[in-house]
């Protein structure tokens, strides 16, 4: 999938309307269309980064923006104390569906343990 037919690029470029719960120079955040918890937010870089492994190692530090956005959103959504889970799916076995890097923020109910 190229940037031209990428759903997250279209949302980031405002070609498809969506409420931005947060935005900075690098990322924006929207509600997941199929929420798996009462709070299910996607934090998405404006840049069309396909996945973690496609990003050169020297540029990975820029992805810290995903984490800083997540702490701001958690405070905004009042889930810092109750807790939340951050998930990034990478590649076919993870179930990554949209080939544009994004971080899920899940909260609002007890989430089952991983592993
Ligand atoms: P992943 O499996 O990590 O690629 O997750 C992709 C997520 O994007 C899924 O949880 C979808 O429900 C969500 N999603 C797909 N299209 C949209 C959309 N137009 N607006 C909001 N969320 C979306
Ligand atoms: Zn994209």
Image (cartoon, helix red, strand yellow):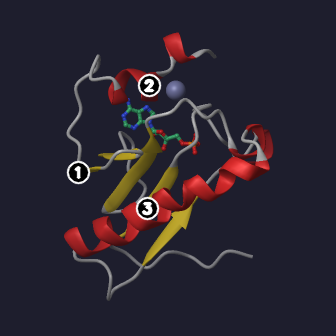
Q: Residue furthest front?
A: 58
Numbered disc 1: secondary structure: loop
Quarter-of-image position of residue 30: top left
The quadrant the C terminus occupies is: bottom right
Q: Which mark is residue 85?
A: none
**Real-space CA distance between mark 1 and mark 3, rounded to the nearest whole angstrom:** 12 Å
For label 1, the residue is: 21
Measured from the top left, where is residue 110 in percent x and y? 43, 79
Are the residues tagged 1 and 3 within 8 Å (C-beta)? no
Q: Residue at x 51, y 20 (%)?
A: 6
Callout in the foreground (2, 3): 2
Q: Residue furthest bottom?
A: 81
**Real-space CA distance between mark 2 and mark 1, rounded to the nearest whole angstrom:** 16 Å
Measured from the top left, where is residue 100 in percent x and y? 57, 34
Q: Residue at x 75, y 37 (%)?
A: 54
Disc 2 or 1, which lies upstream in sequence?
2
For label 3, the residue is: 105
The quadrant the N terminus occupies is: top right
Measured from the top left, where is residue 75 in percent x and y? 25, 75
Measured from the top left, where is residue 25 in percent x and y? 35, 45
Relative side of 100 to 34, left or right = right
Instruction: Judge whether 115 appears above or below 49 on screen.
Output: below
Relative side of 86 to 80, left or right = right
Q: Which mark is residue 9?
A: 2
**Real-space CA distance between mark 2 and mark 3, rounded to the nearest whole angstrom:** 19 Å
* Nearest the eye: 20 or 26: 26
Numbered disc 2: secondary structure: helix
Does the numbered disc 2 mark a residue whose Cβ is under 8 Å from ligand 2?
yes
* Nearest the eye: 111 or 58: 58
- Classed neighbour count for the residue bearing mark 3: other residues with Cα under 10 Å, few (<14), some (14–19), many (≥20): many
The reply to whether residue 77 is in sight is no
């Amino acid at each position: 999938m190229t940037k031209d037919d990428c759903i997250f690029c279209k949302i980031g470029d405002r070609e498809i309307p969506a409420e931005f719960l947060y935005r900075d120079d690098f990322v924006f955040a929207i509600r997941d269309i199929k929420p798996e918890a009462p709070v299910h937010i996607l934090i998405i870089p404006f840049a069309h980064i396909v996945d973690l492994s496609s990003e050169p190692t020297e540029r990975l530090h820029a992805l810290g923006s995903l984490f800083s956005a997540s702490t701001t959103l958690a405070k905004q959504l009042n889930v810092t104390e109750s807790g939340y889970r951050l998930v990034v799916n990478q590649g076919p076995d993870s179930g990554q569906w949209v080939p544009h890097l994004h971080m899920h923020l899940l909260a609002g109910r007890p989430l089952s343990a991983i592993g």
